[in-house]
Image: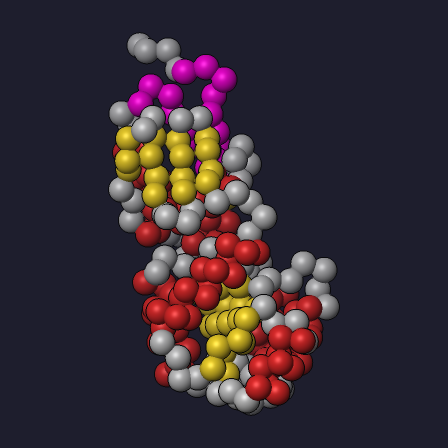
Amino acid sequence: MRILVVEDEKRIADFLCRGLQGAGYAVDAALTGGEALDHIHSADYDIVILDLMLPDMDGLKVLEKIRNRKLGPPVLILSARGGLDDRVKGLEQGADDYLVKPFAFVELLARVRALLRRGQPAPEKLQVGDLSLDCTRRKVSRAGETIDLAPKEFGILEYMMRNRSRPLSRTMIVEHVWDMDYDGLTNIVDVYIRHLRSKIDDRFPQKLIQTVRGIGYMIEAPDRPERQA
């Protein structure tokens, strides 16, 4: 899941980014409305956390431009404007939720998760062969056996399972799961794929994670289990 934080106070933006990354999300940050719109036009986000008092434009203008897109992400307004009129106006203009500063991070995280569940058309439980992933509880099992994954491993596996049988490039995986651009040199995806294979494939006859030569990786369940040598 990828989140855009639009906040001009760098201290707050850094706090939000660290907290959300610690919860397993990929996070981009924008300090101005213009920068936020550039991000939104160049990447797909699962949710936008939006401050209203930005240096170059009102956050409601950013919200309007997001809502003008055919497929816009859920928007959580995070603002010091806590009056009833401000909250009503924000919600009426298209915000999905409104949280007033100061705030408790645990509440913000709960609201983010609620919006992601509400806006996610895909099922909360994913299945590929005998591999199951519970997006809500963040649990993985194969053939009934629980598998423990690190946050980034879970993020990669969820992304692959939501795109079952679709080849995913290393660039796509990095940009979706990590808060970074793929520079063509890092082998970070290959390292994490090896970790995932050791946990969900190595002990099972049917291999689910496939290498797509010249592209990257995909996950699919073969029609029949692989023959034992």
Judged by its main secondary structure, the magenta piece is loop
The structure's colour scheme is: secondary structure
Indicate whether residue 158 is drawn in magenta: no
Q: Is residue 199 above or below residue 152?
A: above
**Whole-percent x and y of residue 193?**
35, 40
Q: Is residue 88 above or below residue 76?
A: below
Residue pictured at 40% horizontal, 26% vertical: 130
**Whole-percent x and y of residue 29?**
47, 72
**Whole-percent x and y of residue 4?**
50, 68
Image quadrant of residue 53? bottom right
Q: Can residue 193 be seen in this view?
A: yes
Indicate whether residue 211 is drawn in magenta: yes
**Whole-percent x and y of residue 1?**
47, 55
Q: Nearer the viewer, residue 222 or 212?
A: 222
Q: Is residue 30 visible?
A: no
Q: Nearer the viewer, residue 113 or 175?
A: 113
Q: Is residue 79 above or below residue 141?
A: below
Residue pictured at 57% horizontal, 76% vertical: 35
Q: Give the range drawn in magenta.
A: 204-225
Q: In this view, does 67 lie to the left or right of 23?
A: right
Image quadrant of residue 142? top left
